[in-house]
Amino acid sequence: MSVKNHPEMDTVLKAIQRANEKYKLDTTQLFQNLSEIEESLRYEQSLLYALNQISMADPNWTFLAANLYLNELYQKAAKNRGYLQEDRYGDFYTLLTYLTNIGIYSKDLLNDYTKDEIDSLGAEIDPDKDYLFNYIGLFLLADRYLAGDYAGNVYELPQERFMIIAMTLMKNEPKTKRLEYIKEAYWALSNLYMTVATPTLSNAGKSFGQLSSCFIDTVDDSLDGIYLNNWDIARLSKDGGGIGIYLGKVRALGSDIKKFKGNSSGVVPWIRLINDTAVSVDQLGQRQGAIAVYLDVFHKDMMNGFLDLKTNNGDERRKAHDIFTGVSIPDLFMMKLEEADENGRSVGEWHTFCPHQVKQIMGWKDDSGTLLGLEDFYDEEDKKFFSEKYEEAVRNPLLPRKTYRAMDIMARIMISQLETGTPYMFYRDEVNRQNPNKHVRGIGRTSIYCSNLCTEIAQNMSATTIVKEYRDEDGNIVIVRKPGEFVVCNLSSINLAKSKHVLERLIPIQVRMLDNVIDLNTISVGQAEVTNKKYRAVGLGTFGWHHLLALEGIYWESDEAVSIADQLYEDIAYYTIRSSMELAKEKGHYSKFVDSEWQTGRYFERKGYTSERWNQLRVAVSKFGVRNGWMMAIAPNSSTAKIGGSTDGIDPLYAVEYAEEKKNFKFKVTAPDLDHHTYTYYRRTRHELNQNWSIRQNAARQRHIDQSISFNLYVRHDIKAKDLLNLHMEAWKQGLKTTYYVRSTSQSEIEECEACHS
C-alpha cells in the first residue's frame, strides 16, 4: 500500500526501504498504519511499531528501528547545523569550529590540525557504517556519548564521534604518519571491531573530563592518609573514575592510638565516610561515585563489621550500602578450608590480627628499616614468605588476635555474596606470583594488595604519605606528599564476534591508542599521573565471547570452548606484546622495564611460551623492551558491548530475549545474530550453565592475561553452601586471580560502574 510522500515522510520511508532490502521484513502492516495516522506522528509510531516487532522469531526488526532512529538523528543534526538532511553528514570542519567556539570541544583539535587535514579526515567519514548498529547500540551511543550543545541538541553524529576519538588519541603522533594512524583508528572504531572505554568514548576531544577508567589507591595507616585518600577519590570520582581502595594497612577496632589502648574505631567508620563521598560526589552529574574497598581476610575487622557492610541485617550505623567490597585471600586460607577431621568436618583455624599491632610487636623490617606487616608478603611457588610470617605471628603469645574456624569466615563471605553479590575475591598470592613487575619490591614482597572496582586490574601499589608541612616565604602552608603508586586503568576492548579475522591488523592500532591515552590524559590526582607514566599500564580486553561461540557453533559447556579460549587468547597476547615491543622500538620502553620479567624472559617461561614465534618475540622484547608494564585486562563491557552489537565481556548471555526499558518506552532485545542456528548455542543462559565450565574457560584465558578478568559466578538463590564453596575452591585451584560478583537469581540486576566498561 502506498503512502502519500510528504517531504517529512522521507526519513521514515527511506529507513523502511533500506531495512526491507537487507532483511526482507514484512512491513505491510506498518505501511497500513502509516496511511491511517497523522503525519506528525508517523516517525514515532513507526519506531514503536518496529520495536514491538522485535522477537526471537524476527530479531532483525531491531535494524529497522535503528534505521528509523538514525534518520531522526540525521534530521535533527541537519536542522541544527544547517545542511540538507539527504547528505546525512554535514561539513566536519564546521562542526569542529562551532562546538569548539561554544566550549564543548577542546581547542586542541583546531590548534593541532590544519583545515586541510580536517577536511581530508572529514572525507574519510563513512555514513554507511552507521547501519552496523542495532537499535539499543545506537540508542546508547546517541543518548550518552554524542556531543551536543548545552541544551542537549543533536550536533555530533556517530561516525564523527569515532573520528574525533581517533584524532584526539593520535594528535601527538609524528605529522608524517599521523593521518595514517587516524584513518586506521577510525577503521577499527567505525567497523565496531573494538570499543574504547566509556571515559574515552565520552570525553575524547572535549574540553572537560578525563580518559582513564579506574583507579586504585592504598591507604596509609594515619589520619592524614585516610583523609587525603578521601580527598583524592572525591576528585577522581567527580571526573567519572571508578575507584578501588585497599584498607588493609589501617589499624583494627580496639587497637591503640599513640599508645592509648583500645581507642581505634577500626576500618568501618572510615568506609562509611568513603560511602558518603561516593554518594555526594557524583560522576559528572550522571551517576553516583562507584567505589570498592578491599580488606585482607587476616585483618581483625574482617569479621567485625566488614562482611556485614552491605547486608540488610544488623546495626545500620555500621553499614555502607553504596560501596562495594572485596576480600584479599592468601593460598593458606584456602588450604585451611580443606582441613577436616575424621568425620569430614572442617576444622582449619584462622587467626585475624590488627596490622598496626603486627608491625609493632613482630618488628619485620626491610633494608630501608621500614616496618612490614603480614600484608607485605606473599607466597611464591618455592618459598612461602607469607605463610612463614603468618605462622610466626600465630606463635607469638604477645600478639593479640581473634581466632575462628576458617569455614565460619568463608560462610559469612558466601552469605553476603548471595544477598548482595559481594565481596569480590582477590587471590593475592597468585596475583603477585604472576606479576611481571615484582622486581620493584622484590620476590616475596607484596606489590599488589588488591584489584579495582571491576576486579580486572592488577598493578603495583603503595601508599602516598606526607613528608612534611611547612610555611613558605609568602606565608603559605605547604604540604609535601611523597607519591605512592596510585594505579590507573586505561582500557579498550576487542569485539571478538566481529574481529577474530583482523586481530593482527587491529591490535597494533589499539595498543597505540591505549598508549597515547597515558600522555594525553589530565588526571586531577598528581600521584596517579606519576604512576601512569611510570609503568604506562594499559588493559586491552575483549567482549562478545558468547556471541563468538554461537557464531562458531560451539557449546558453552564443552572442551572445545575451553580449547578455543586458550588458542584465541594466546593469539591476542602474542599480538599485544608484539605491538608493545614495536612501540618500545619507536618511543622507548617504560621506566621500570630493566630487571622486569619482560626483560629477563621469566614471564614467557612461566606461561610456557616455547614456540618459534614466541621465542623470536622473547628475544626482541629483551632487546628493545616493551612500552607498557602491563598490557591486558578484561573489563565487564556491558554498555560498550551493546554499542558494539555483541554480548557482555566474557559472560554468558543474560537471556535469549529480554525487555529493555528506556525513558518513555519498553522494547525487546534479542541475542546478537540470532537465528535457528545460533539459538542452539545461546539457549542455555547465565544461571542455567554449569559454572565449572565457565571457570575452566576462564582459567585457559587467564593464562594469557597479565592482569586479571572481570569474571562473574551465576548461581541459583537456593544453591547449597557446599556447592558455592566448591565453585570458589575450583576458581582458586584453577589459578584465577579474581572473581567478580556472585550473581544469584534472587538478586536484581546489579548496576556496575560504567567507567570500567570498555
Image (cartoon, rainbow, N blue to C red):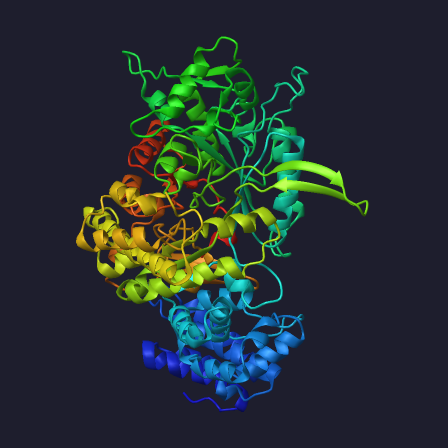
Residue 557 on image: x %, y %: 24, 46
Q: For this view, does 280 lie left or right of residue 575?
A: right
- Which residue of the protein is positioned furthest toward the front in this rendering? 473
Residue 645 on image: x %, y %: 39, 64
Q: Quadrant of the N terminus?
A: bottom left
Q: Residue at x 66, y 76 (%)?
A: 101
- Which residue of the protein is positioned furthest toward the left in this rendering? 612
Q: For this view, does 646 lie left or right of residue 215?
A: left
- Residue 722 versus residue 425 in the image, above or below: above
Q: Nearest the camera: 330 or 136? A: 330
Quadrant assignment, res 736: top left
Quadrant assignment, res 206: bottom right
Q: Quadrant of the C terminus?
A: bottom left
Q: Residue at x 37, y 40 (%)?
A: 435
- Residue 275 versus residue 758 in the image, above or below: above
Q: Nearest the camera: 637 or 180? A: 180
Residue 726 on image: x %, y %: 32, 30
So how many labels did they put on this image? Answer: 0
Residue 233 visible in the snapshot? yes
Q: Nearest the camera: 565 or 434? A: 434
- Which residue of the protein is positioned furthest toward the top in this rendering? 397
Residue 601 on image: x %, y %: 28, 45
Q: For this view, does 740 lie left or right of residue 6?
A: left
Residue 645 visible in the snapshot? no
